[in-house]
Image (tube, grey):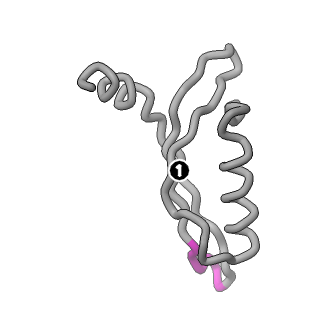
Amino acid sequence: MITVHPDDREFVFDQVKKKQAGSEENLENYQFRGITKLGKIIWLENFTKNIIYEGKSANFVAFFDITERKHAQEEVS
């Protein structure tokens, strides 16, 4: 189980609300921090797309753990 980091919560929930409302302003791809069950902070990348599933409108959502990539970018910077 992952919880959205408090500093990113407003942004993520705003994106979810926009997506549910069908707003054109929502982002289909974004990154945010999460907190694992053990309290570790990780980075997630979210991809979302409207699709038709079994004849009905649905949201396809995929999350990827990009923590290692973020740490590597920090080391290079």
Q: Where, by quadrant of the figure, is residue 54 drawn?
A: bottom right
The answer to whether 21 appears left or right of 65 in the picture is right
Q: Residue at x 73, y 32 (%)?
A: 6
- Magenta segment: does it hold 53? yes
Identity, as a three-letter code, of the amino acid under mark 1: Asn
Between residue 71 and residue 10, name the one nearer to us. 10
Q: Residue at x 67, y 49 (%)?
A: 12
Residue extent of the magenta highlight: 50-55
Q: Residue 3, how many percent across, how many down? A: 71, 32
Between residue 74 and residue 47, name the one nearer to us. 74
Q: Where, by quadrant of the figure, is residue 15 drawn?
A: bottom right
Q: Residues within 10 Å of mark 1 (few under 14, many from 20)?
A: some
Tag 1, which secondary structure? strand
* Placement of 2 over or under 20, stated as above or below: above
**Mark 1 highlights which residue?**
46
- Magenta segment: does it hold 44? no
Q: Residue 57, how many percent across, how many down? A: 67, 80
* Placement of 60 over or under 53, stated as above or below: above
The answer to whether 76 appears left or right of 57 in the picture is left
Count the marks: how many?
Answer: 1
Between residue 35 and residue 73, name the one nearer to us. 73
* Placement of 22 over or under 2, stated as above or below: below
Q: Residue at x 53, y 46 (%)?
A: 63
For the stretch drawn in magenta, the main secondary structure is strand
Q: Residue furthest left?
A: 76
The quadrant of the rendering that contains the N terminus is: top right
Q: Residue 14, how many percent across, how many down? A: 72, 57
Q: Where, by quadrant of the figure, is residue 20 drawn?
A: bottom right
The quadrant of the rendering that contains the C terminus is: top left
* Placement of 59 over or under 34, stated as above or below: below
